[in-house]
Image (tube, helix red, strand yellow):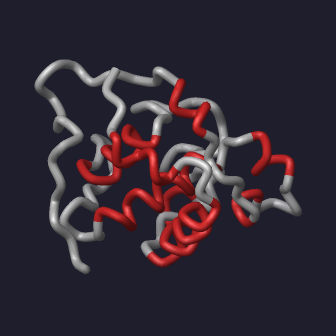
Amino acid sequence: MTIDPRAAAYYDNAAAVNTGKQLFKQYNCSGCHSNGGGGMGPSLMDGEWIYGGRLEQIHQTLVEGRPNGMPAWGGKVSDPQLWQISAYVRSLSLPQTLAAQNGPTPSQTPAPVPRSAEQDTGWTAPPDTTNDFGATLKGPD
């Protein structure tokens, strides 16, 4: 299991989660994921993470994209913004976020992602099929 050291700054970081929430809207992630409840894309509010639920795994999904519709955002969106979106996406399934639900959009009051969330072993990519978490694609500033 690889833990990307860049992820550490985004755990227990309410500001990153709230910025990620704004970026999620700005980049129209809701177009596929609704307000996190799923639609054309999978739900982000349950405990099922197809490609892993640690921040670096979510970040990698955003950077590289995934088969069947998830576009690659690496090189198109700045890396710090991708980390912020990752923190917001991970926050959507937290019990604290779900408990703050006021109506059909629980994603409106996201909780910071606790460090304990990195203990989720999640999904592991087959060898040589994905980046080493050290590569950074330069996006707009």
Q: In which quarter of the image is the N terminus?
A: top left
Where residue 46 sits, quadrant-wise, is: top right
Where residue 137 sits, quadrant-wise, is: bottom left
Please give left or right for residue 128 compared with residue 112 in the image: left
Residue 2: x and y in percent read: 31, 27
Please give left or right for residue 6 compared with residue 120 in the image: left
- The residue at the point 52 percent across, 44 percent down is 42
- The residue at the point 48 percent across, 72 percent down is 23
Farthest residue, direction left: 128
Q: How many numbered circles are shown?
A: 0
Residue 65: x and y in percent read: 28, 49
Between 10 and 74, the one lying in front of the other is 10
| Relative to 119, residue 74 above or below | below
- The residue at the point 16 percent across, 66 percent down is 138
Residue 66: x and y in percent read: 30, 43
- The residue at the point 47 percent across, 21 percent down is 121
| Relative to 44, residue 14 above or below | below
Residue 56: x and y in percent read: 38, 41
Please give left or right for residue 24 compared with residue 57 in the image: right
Please give left or right for residue 59 compared with residue 47 in the image: left
